[in-house]
Amino acid sequence: MKNIFLIFTLFSISIIAQETDYNIDANGCGVKGYDLVSYFDGEATSGKKEFSYTYDEVEYLFSSQGNLDKFKLNPTQYLPQYGGYCAYAMGKKGEKVKMDPSEFEIRDGKLYLFYKSYFNDTHKKWKKEGAEKLKEKADENWEEITTKP
């Protein structure tokens, strides 16, 4: 019984740590299963389960073996900023808000994701309100969030 409790406790702590730093979906995938490498080719492409890879306890899916291999060579080059949460919300309010994986921007070689609904397009707001200013504030907010005990 002690072993079961210990395993459950460790599993629970692991999930809490992941949710603090990564925006993962109900299946445990980062970026809602989209291929991180494809963003750097200018496309938002869904990944496939057959091309999956776990990095820092988060499963990522890729659309091809080639993209999976690229990711494995340098994972941090492809990871989204702010754990995959909406960049605009992080800059504007310091909040972890879900994102739409088809709304993205590559800025200075980094991936930024954005929330979008019928009446709220945060990528447009990001550009209109000053992406550089919001990015600086988002960087500060993310640093504060991820360094809190």
Image (cartoon, rainbow, N blue to C red):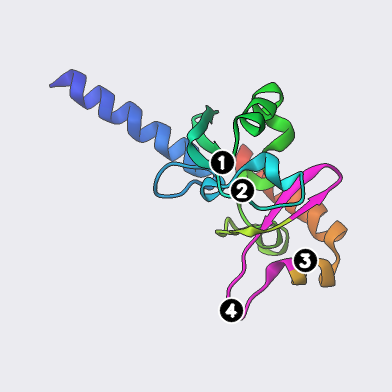
Q: Please tell me whether mark 4 or mark 2 is closer to you in this view.
A: 4
Mark closer to the chain start, 2 or 3: 2
| Residue depicted at 12% across the width and 21% down the height | 1
| Residue depicted at 76% across the width and 44% down the height | 40
| Residue depicted at 86% across the width and 66% down the height | 130
Mark closer to the chain start, 4 or 2: 2
Magenta stretch, residue numbers: 105-123
Q: Which residue is mark 3?
A: 126
What type is the residue that disc 4 sits on? Tyr
* Residue situated in front as seen by the camera: 67 or 85: 67
Asked if residue 79 is among those painted magenta in the image, a careful observer would answer: no
Q: Which residue is mark 2?
A: 84
What type is the residue that disc 3 sits on? Trp
| Residue 63 x %, y % | 58, 40
Q: Which residue is mark 1?
A: 21
* C-alpha span from label 4 to label 1: 27 Å
